[in-house]
Image (cartoon, rainbow, N blue to C red):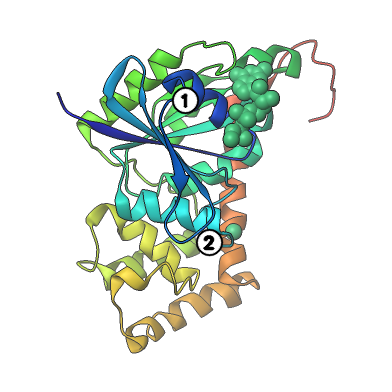
Amino acid sequence: AEKYNIALAGNPNCGKTTLFNELTGSNGYVGNWPGVTVEKKMATWKKDHDVTFVDLPGIYSLSPYSPEEVVSRDYVVNERPDAVIDLLDVTNIERNLYLTTQLLEAGRPVVVGLNMCDLLKQHGETIDVKELSHMLGVPVVEVSALRNHNLDKLVREAERAAKEGTPAKPLECFSPEVEEALAKIAKGIEGQCKPELVRWYAVKVFERDVDAIKPLGLTAEEVKAFEPTIEAVERDRDDDAESIITGDRYDFIAKVMDRAVKKSVGALSTSE
Ligand code: GDP
Ligand code: MG
Ligand code: K
Protein backbone atom coordinates (compact mmCIF):
# COMPACT_ATOMS: atom_id res chain seq x y z
CA ALA A 1 0.00 0.00 0.00
CA GLU A 2 1.03 3.60 -0.46
CA LYS A 3 2.61 5.28 2.53
CA TYR A 4 1.61 8.82 3.43
CA ASN A 5 3.10 11.46 5.67
CA ILE A 6 0.43 13.74 7.04
CA ALA A 7 1.49 16.86 8.93
CA LEU A 8 -0.61 18.22 11.79
CA ALA A 9 -0.51 22.01 11.88
CA GLY A 10 -2.31 24.51 14.08
CA ASN A 11 -2.12 27.26 16.66
CA PRO A 12 -0.93 26.52 20.20
CA ASN A 13 -3.76 24.99 22.28
CA CYS A 14 -5.90 24.00 19.29
CA GLY A 15 -5.80 20.39 20.51
CA LYS A 16 -3.04 18.99 18.31
CA THR A 17 -1.43 16.88 21.01
CA THR A 18 -4.82 15.47 22.00
CA LEU A 19 -5.48 14.62 18.35
CA PHE A 20 -2.00 13.15 17.81
CA ASN A 21 -2.29 10.94 20.90
CA GLU A 22 -5.79 9.81 20.01
CA LEU A 23 -4.75 8.90 16.45
CA THR A 24 -1.45 7.24 17.25
CA GLY A 25 -1.69 6.00 20.83
CA SER A 26 1.47 8.13 21.27
CA ASN A 27 3.84 5.25 20.58
CA GLY A 28 5.97 7.01 18.01
CA TYR A 29 9.27 8.77 17.71
CA VAL A 30 9.97 11.84 19.81
CA GLY A 31 13.09 13.89 19.16
CA ASN A 32 14.10 17.33 18.07
CA TRP A 33 13.95 19.05 14.71
CA PRO A 34 17.48 19.39 13.25
CA GLY A 35 19.45 22.24 14.78
CA VAL A 36 16.81 23.49 17.21
CA THR A 37 15.36 22.43 20.54
CA VAL A 38 11.87 22.17 19.12
CA GLU A 39 10.20 18.84 19.79
CA LYS A 40 9.53 16.63 16.78
CA LYS A 41 6.92 13.92 17.13
CA MET A 42 6.10 11.29 14.52
CA ALA A 43 3.95 8.19 14.83
CA THR A 44 1.75 6.02 12.68
CA TRP A 45 -2.04 5.88 12.73
CA LYS A 46 -3.16 3.09 15.00
CA LYS A 47 -5.73 2.04 12.36
CA ASP A 48 -3.31 2.00 9.41
CA HIS A 49 0.45 1.99 9.89
CA ASP A 50 0.99 3.22 6.33
CA VAL A 51 -0.15 6.65 7.53
CA THR A 52 2.45 8.59 9.53
CA PHE A 53 1.50 11.74 11.41
CA VAL A 54 4.05 14.48 11.92
CA ASP A 55 3.09 16.79 14.76
CA LEU A 56 4.33 20.27 13.86
CA PRO A 57 4.95 22.79 16.64
CA GLY A 58 1.97 25.00 17.56
CA ILE A 59 2.29 28.29 15.69
CA TYR A 60 0.21 31.39 14.91
CA SER A 61 1.74 31.99 11.48
CA LEU A 62 4.28 30.72 8.96
CA SER A 63 6.16 34.02 9.13
CA PRO A 64 9.58 33.06 10.40
CA TYR A 65 9.82 34.92 13.70
CA SER A 66 10.41 31.89 15.90
CA PRO A 67 12.22 28.55 15.54
CA GLU A 68 8.79 26.87 15.67
CA GLU A 69 7.61 28.85 12.65
CA VAL A 70 10.81 28.16 10.72
CA VAL A 71 10.59 24.43 11.43
CA SER A 72 6.95 24.28 10.36
CA ARG A 73 7.48 26.36 7.24
CA ASP A 74 10.53 24.37 6.12
CA TYR A 75 8.77 21.08 6.70
CA VAL A 76 5.64 21.99 4.75
CA VAL A 77 7.31 23.91 1.90
CA ASN A 78 10.55 21.97 1.46
CA GLU A 79 10.02 18.48 2.84
CA ARG A 80 6.52 18.41 1.40
CA PRO A 81 4.28 16.13 3.45
CA ASP A 82 1.69 14.30 1.33
CA ALA A 83 -1.05 16.32 3.03
CA VAL A 84 -1.53 18.79 5.86
CA ILE A 85 -4.29 18.63 8.45
CA ASP A 86 -4.85 22.20 9.62
CA LEU A 87 -6.50 21.91 13.03
CA LEU A 88 -8.51 24.92 14.19
CA ASP A 89 -9.91 25.65 17.63
CA VAL A 90 -13.47 26.64 16.70
CA THR A 91 -13.84 28.73 19.85
CA ASN A 92 -11.01 30.91 18.46
CA ILE A 93 -11.69 30.54 14.79
CA GLU A 94 -10.93 34.09 13.65
CA ARG A 95 -7.42 34.03 15.05
CA ASN A 96 -6.83 30.43 13.96
CA LEU A 97 -7.76 31.15 10.33
CA TYR A 98 -4.72 33.40 9.90
CA LEU A 99 -2.39 30.40 9.71
CA THR A 100 -4.87 28.72 7.36
CA THR A 101 -4.58 31.56 4.83
CA GLN A 102 -0.82 30.93 4.77
CA LEU A 103 -0.97 27.13 4.74
CA LEU A 104 -3.19 27.24 1.66
CA GLU A 105 -0.31 28.93 -0.19
CA ALA A 106 2.29 26.34 0.78
CA GLY A 107 1.71 24.07 -2.22
CA ARG A 108 0.40 21.01 -0.37
CA PRO A 109 -3.03 19.35 -0.14
CA VAL A 110 -4.82 20.70 2.95
CA VAL A 111 -7.77 19.44 4.99
CA VAL A 112 -9.20 21.62 7.74
CA GLY A 113 -10.31 20.05 11.02
CA LEU A 114 -12.62 22.17 13.14
CA ASN A 115 -11.69 20.98 16.60
CA MET A 116 -13.58 21.40 19.88
CA CYS A 117 -16.87 21.36 18.04
CA ASP A 118 -18.31 19.89 21.26
CA LEU A 119 -17.92 23.41 22.73
CA LEU A 120 -19.58 25.29 19.86
CA LYS A 121 -23.09 25.25 21.26
CA GLN A 122 -22.11 26.65 24.63
CA HIS A 123 -19.82 29.08 22.83
CA GLY A 124 -22.94 30.43 21.13
CA GLU A 125 -21.88 29.95 17.53
CA THR A 126 -22.78 27.78 14.60
CA ILE A 127 -20.52 27.20 11.66
CA ASP A 128 -21.73 26.76 8.12
CA VAL A 129 -19.24 24.04 7.23
CA LYS A 130 -20.27 23.95 3.58
CA GLU A 131 -19.79 27.69 3.16
CA LEU A 132 -16.50 27.60 5.04
CA SER A 133 -15.25 24.76 2.85
CA HIS A 134 -16.40 26.67 -0.24
CA MET A 135 -14.60 29.86 0.82
CA LEU A 136 -11.38 28.05 1.75
CA GLY A 137 -11.51 25.69 -1.23
CA VAL A 138 -10.59 22.62 0.84
CA PRO A 139 -12.49 19.91 2.76
CA VAL A 140 -13.60 20.91 6.26
CA VAL A 141 -14.49 18.33 8.92
CA GLU A 142 -16.00 19.09 12.33
CA VAL A 143 -14.20 17.05 14.99
CA SER A 144 -13.60 16.73 18.68
CA ALA A 145 -10.18 15.34 19.50
CA LEU A 146 -11.11 15.07 23.18
CA ARG A 147 -14.29 13.09 22.51
CA ASN A 148 -12.90 11.14 19.57
CA HIS A 149 -15.64 12.49 17.33
CA ASN A 150 -15.23 12.30 13.53
CA LEU A 151 -11.47 11.66 13.72
CA ASP A 152 -11.61 8.76 11.24
CA LYS A 153 -13.47 10.99 8.81
CA LEU A 154 -10.80 13.67 9.15
CA VAL A 155 -7.99 11.21 8.48
CA ARG A 156 -9.84 9.61 5.54
CA GLU A 157 -10.25 13.07 3.98
CA ALA A 158 -6.55 13.75 4.50
CA GLU A 159 -5.68 10.35 3.04
CA ARG A 160 -7.83 11.05 0.01
CA ALA A 161 -6.21 14.48 -0.42
CA ALA A 162 -2.77 12.87 -0.13
CA LYS A 163 -3.65 10.23 -2.72
CA GLU A 164 -4.95 12.86 -5.15
CA GLY A 165 -1.93 15.02 -4.45
CA THR A 166 -3.62 18.20 -5.62
CA PRO A 167 -2.15 21.21 -3.81
CA ALA A 168 -4.62 23.55 -2.14
CA LYS A 169 -5.44 26.54 -4.32
CA PRO A 170 -4.18 29.75 -2.69
CA LEU A 171 -6.96 32.13 -1.68
CA GLU A 172 -7.40 35.24 -3.72
CA CYS A 173 -7.53 37.13 -0.49
CA PHE A 174 -5.55 40.27 -1.28
CA SER A 175 -6.79 43.64 -2.47
CA PRO A 176 -6.63 44.38 -6.23
CA GLU A 177 -3.45 46.49 -6.12
CA VAL A 178 -1.67 43.76 -4.16
CA GLU A 179 -2.95 41.04 -6.50
CA GLU A 180 -1.63 43.06 -9.42
CA ALA A 181 1.80 43.36 -7.82
CA LEU A 182 1.83 39.64 -6.95
CA ALA A 183 0.97 38.78 -10.56
CA LYS A 184 3.91 40.85 -11.78
CA ILE A 185 6.25 39.22 -9.31
CA ALA A 186 4.87 35.76 -10.16
CA LYS A 187 5.74 36.35 -13.82
CA GLY A 188 9.27 37.31 -12.82
CA ILE A 189 9.90 34.17 -10.75
CA GLU A 190 8.15 31.64 -13.01
CA GLY A 191 10.37 28.64 -13.66
CA GLN A 192 12.39 29.29 -10.50
CA CYS A 193 10.21 27.05 -8.35
CA LYS A 194 7.48 24.42 -8.52
CA PRO A 195 4.34 25.84 -10.17
CA GLU A 196 2.29 25.27 -7.00
CA LEU A 197 4.72 27.47 -5.05
CA VAL A 198 4.80 30.49 -7.37
CA ARG A 199 2.11 32.28 -5.36
CA TRP A 200 3.83 31.42 -2.05
CA TYR A 201 7.14 32.85 -3.26
CA ALA A 202 5.50 35.88 -4.89
CA VAL A 203 4.05 36.80 -1.47
CA LYS A 204 7.43 36.21 0.16
CA VAL A 205 9.18 38.44 -2.41
CA PHE A 206 6.54 41.11 -1.79
CA GLU A 207 7.12 40.82 1.99
CA ARG A 208 10.90 41.07 1.40
CA ASP A 209 11.39 37.83 3.31
CA VAL A 210 14.98 37.29 2.14
CA ASP A 211 15.36 34.06 4.06
CA ALA A 212 12.23 32.44 2.64
CA ILE A 213 13.07 33.32 -0.98
CA LYS A 214 16.59 31.82 -0.93
CA PRO A 215 15.45 28.65 -2.76
CA LEU A 216 14.50 30.84 -5.75
CA GLY A 217 18.19 31.54 -6.31
CA LEU A 218 17.58 35.13 -7.44
CA THR A 219 20.50 37.52 -7.72
CA ALA A 220 20.46 40.67 -5.58
CA GLU A 221 19.78 42.60 -8.76
CA GLU A 222 16.81 40.44 -9.67
CA VAL A 223 15.37 40.93 -6.19
CA LYS A 224 15.92 44.66 -6.43
CA ALA A 225 14.07 44.79 -9.73
CA PHE A 226 10.82 44.03 -7.84
CA GLU A 227 11.24 47.07 -5.56
CA PRO A 228 9.35 49.58 -7.73
CA THR A 229 6.36 47.20 -7.84
CA ILE A 230 6.38 46.76 -4.06
CA GLU A 231 7.03 50.42 -3.28
CA ALA A 232 4.17 51.57 -5.51
CA VAL A 233 1.71 49.55 -3.39
CA GLU A 234 3.31 50.79 -0.17
CA ARG A 235 2.88 54.42 -1.27
CA ASP A 236 -0.66 53.74 -2.39
CA ARG A 237 -1.58 52.10 0.94
CA ASP A 238 0.70 54.23 3.10
CA ASP A 239 1.89 51.10 4.88
CA ASP A 240 4.75 48.61 4.72
CA ALA A 241 4.48 45.53 2.53
CA GLU A 242 4.35 43.00 5.35
CA SER A 243 1.57 44.85 7.20
CA ILE A 244 -0.37 45.20 3.96
CA ILE A 245 -0.30 41.43 3.46
CA THR A 246 -1.30 40.79 7.08
CA GLY A 247 -4.10 43.36 6.91
CA ASP A 248 -5.52 41.89 3.71
CA ARG A 249 -5.49 38.40 5.23
CA TYR A 250 -7.52 39.67 8.17
CA ASP A 251 -9.95 41.45 5.84
CA PHE A 252 -10.52 38.15 4.07
CA ILE A 253 -11.00 36.37 7.42
CA ALA A 254 -13.60 38.98 8.38
CA LYS A 255 -15.55 38.02 5.25
CA VAL A 256 -15.30 34.35 6.20
CA MET A 257 -16.56 35.14 9.71
CA ASP A 258 -19.42 37.14 8.24
CA ARG A 259 -20.57 34.43 5.85
CA ALA A 260 -19.72 31.15 7.57
CA VAL A 261 -19.90 31.80 11.33
CA LYS A 262 -23.21 32.73 12.92
CA LYS A 263 -24.08 33.66 16.46
CA SER A 264 -26.72 31.16 17.44
CA VAL A 265 -30.08 32.29 18.78
CA GLY A 266 -30.03 32.52 22.53
CA ALA A 267 -26.28 33.02 22.73
CA LEU A 268 -25.19 34.68 25.94
CA SER A 269 -23.24 37.40 24.19
CA THR A 270 -25.24 40.03 22.32
CA SER A 271 -22.21 41.80 20.90
CA GLU A 272 -20.93 41.03 17.43
P1 GDP B 1 -2.07 21.69 21.63
O1 GDP B 1 -1.38 22.83 22.30
O2 GDP B 1 -2.57 22.06 20.29
O3 GDP B 1 -1.24 20.45 21.60
O4 GDP B 1 -3.39 21.40 22.48
P2 GDP B 1 -3.70 20.23 23.53
O5 GDP B 1 -3.92 18.94 22.83
O6 GDP B 1 -2.71 20.24 24.61
O7 GDP B 1 -5.13 20.72 24.04
C1 GDP B 1 -5.31 21.95 24.71
C2 GDP B 1 -6.51 21.82 25.64
O8 GDP B 1 -7.69 21.67 24.85
C3 GDP B 1 -6.43 20.61 26.55
O9 GDP B 1 -6.96 20.98 27.80
C4 GDP B 1 -7.33 19.60 25.86
O10 GDP B 1 -7.91 18.68 26.76
C5 GDP B 1 -8.38 20.49 25.25
N1 GDP B 1 -9.02 19.90 24.06
C6 GDP B 1 -8.41 19.35 22.98
N2 GDP B 1 -9.32 18.92 22.10
C7 GDP B 1 -10.53 19.22 22.59
C8 GDP B 1 -11.89 19.02 22.14
O11 GDP B 1 -12.16 18.50 21.05
N3 GDP B 1 -12.87 19.48 22.95
C9 GDP B 1 -12.63 20.08 24.14
N4 GDP B 1 -13.66 20.48 24.86
N5 GDP B 1 -11.38 20.27 24.59
C10 GDP B 1 -10.34 19.85 23.85
MG1 MG C 1 0.79 20.22 22.01
K1 K D 1 2.91 38.39 9.98
State the image coordinates of residue 122 (x, y, percent, origin top left): 75, 13
* Left or right of 95 in this view: 51: left
Name the side, left or right, on which 261 lies relative to 133.
right
Q: Relative to 31, does residue 212 appear above or below in the rendering?
A: below
Residue where numbered disc 2 is placed: 64
Q: Residue furthest bottom?
A: 221
Residue 145, compared with residue 57, is above or below; it is: above
In front: 29, or 93?
Answer: 29
**Pair 2/1: label in front:** 1
What residue lies at 36% left-to-right and 17% top-to-bottom?
46
- 102 vs 217: above or below: above
The amino acid sitting under disc 2 is: Pro
x and y percent of residue 64 in the render? Answer: 53, 61
Q: Quadrant of the N terminus?
A: top left
Residue at the spot 51% in from the left edge and 31% down from the top edge:
87
Q: Secondary structure at mark 1?
A: loop
Q: Position of residue 49 (x, y in %)?
A: 28, 22
Residue 5 in the figure: left or right of residue 131:
left
Image coordinates for residue 117, horizontal then vertical, percent: 60, 17
The answer for how far apart the CA atoms under marks 2 and 1 are is 28 Å
Q: Which residue is mark 1?
A: 26
In terms of sequence position, does the residue under pointer 2 or pointer 1 come before the other?
Answer: 1
Instruction: Name which residue lies at 59% across and 77% down.
Output: 235
Mark 2, Cα crowd under 10 Å, few <14 / some 14-19 / many 20+, is some
Asked if one can make out residue 78 in the rendered structure from this viewpoint, the answer is: yes
